[in-house]
């Protein structure tokens, strides 16, 4: 089970001094709840940039990205994005769930 992801007209421009690099140029896509997809492409095509925006690790220059009911691109840096990462991304999209890693060789209590 997972969350629906809707991306519309997503743009990400990196600026380094006077040089601009467009990592995403108006990307639109939809992943339905429970659907499994693979993102493939050559180096530099924007795969990691897309995942970073959807996961709340980076902000978009333009466009929108929605994960479940959360408009990720509308979240405020730091406070809202941190909450999104801690409660949605780190817990497989299940708000309030606790992910626990068990030490190697031990069974859960």
Image (tube, rainbow, N blue to C red):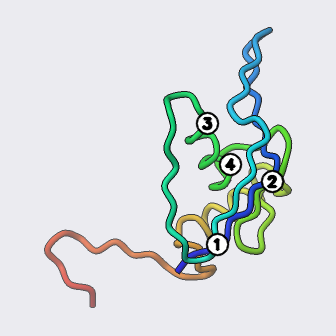
**Secondary structure under badge 3?**
loop
* Residue at 55%, 77% in the rendered image: 34
The answer for how far apart the CA atoms under marks 3 and 1 are is 21 Å
Find numbered disc 4 in the image and state the secondary structure of the residue it sits on: helix
Q: Which mark is in front, 3 or 1?
A: 1
Q: CA distance from mark 4 to mark 3?
A: 11 Å
Q: Position of residue 45 (x, y in %)?
A: 59, 32
What residue sits right under mark 1 in the picture?
A: 32
Give the image location of residue 10, x and y in percent: 78, 45
User: Few, some or many C-alpha atoms within 10 Å of disc 4 (few <14, some 14-19, many ≥20)?
Assistant: some
**Marks 1/4: CA–CA distance:** 18 Å
Outermost residue toward the left in this view = 105
Instruction: Classify 10 Å Cα crowding around label 3: few (below 14), some (14-19), many (20 and above).
Output: many
Quadrant of the image containing the C terminus: bottom left
Residue highlighted by disc 2? 8
Q: Nearer the viewer, mark 2 or mark 4?
A: 2
Alpha carbons under labels 2 and 4: distance apart = 12 Å
């Amino acid at each position: 089970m997972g969350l629906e992801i809707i991306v519309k007209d997503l743009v990400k421009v990196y600026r380094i001094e006077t040089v601009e690099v467009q990592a995403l140029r108006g990307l639109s896509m939809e992943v339905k709840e429970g659907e499994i997809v693979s993102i493939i492409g050559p180096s530099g095509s924007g795969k990691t940039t897309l995942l970073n925006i959807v996961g709340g690790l980076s902000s978009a220059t333009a466009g929108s990205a929605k994960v479940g009911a959360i408009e990720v691109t509308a979240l405020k840096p730091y406070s809202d994005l941190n909450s999104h990462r801690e409660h949605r991304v780190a817990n497989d999209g299940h708000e309030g769930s606790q992910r626990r890693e068990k030490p190697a060789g031990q069974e859960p209590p």
